Image (cartoon, rainbow, N blue to C red):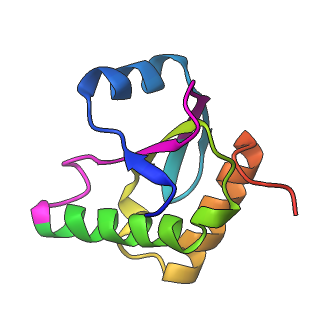
Amino acid sequence: MQFTVPLCENRDFRRMYAKADNVLGGCMVVYGRRNRSGVNRLGFTVSTKVGNAVIRNRARRRLKECYRLHEKDFKTGFDIVIAARGRAVTAPFEKLQREMLDLCRKLGLMRSL
């Protein structure tokens, strides 16, 4: 990902869950909050309730690919956390892309075209 750095610290994830705006979808929950840098920081979470490690990693890879394909459409300067739900594993890829873009648009994370 060219314009994005990973969000790795546990305290950053906890801050996002507590203070960030969020939007709930069928396959994921998106948290977004403005940061003080000129780049996006992106984190993914998948609960152990979703499945074993293989299934969780598959869900994470699919969500990362959705973001990567549309990275240029996102505004810069935001912290973004995408939490996968159980349906993210079995949903068609096109549905995941559409839902991610719709949820991010609702949070104001997308550039206006």
Q: Which residues are magenta?
A: 31-53
Residue 110's place in the image compared with 81, above or below, is below
42 falls in the magenta region: yes
Q: Nearer the viewer, residue 80 or 82?
A: 80
Q: Residue furthest left?
A: 53
In the shown orientation, is residue 27 left or right of residue 104? left
Quarter-of-image position of residue 95: bottom right
Quadrant of the image containing the C terminus: bottom right
Residue 60's place in the image compared with 78, above or below, is below
Disc tally is 0
Q: Position of residue 69 (x, y in %)?
A: 54, 74
Quarter-of-image position of residue 73: bottom right
Q: Position of residue 1 (x, y in %)?
A: 43, 64
> Which residue is at 58% across, 63% downward?
71
In the shown orientation, is residue 41 left or right of residue 35? left
> Which residue is at 32% across, 69% downward?
61
Q: Position of residue 105 (x, y in %)?
A: 74, 52
96 falls in the magenta region: no
Q: Residue furthest right?
A: 113
In the shown orientation, is residue 11 left or right of residue 35? left
Residue 64's place in the image compared with 16, above or below, is below
Q: Position of residue 7 (x, y in %)?
A: 35, 39
> Which residue is at 21% across, 65% downward?
57
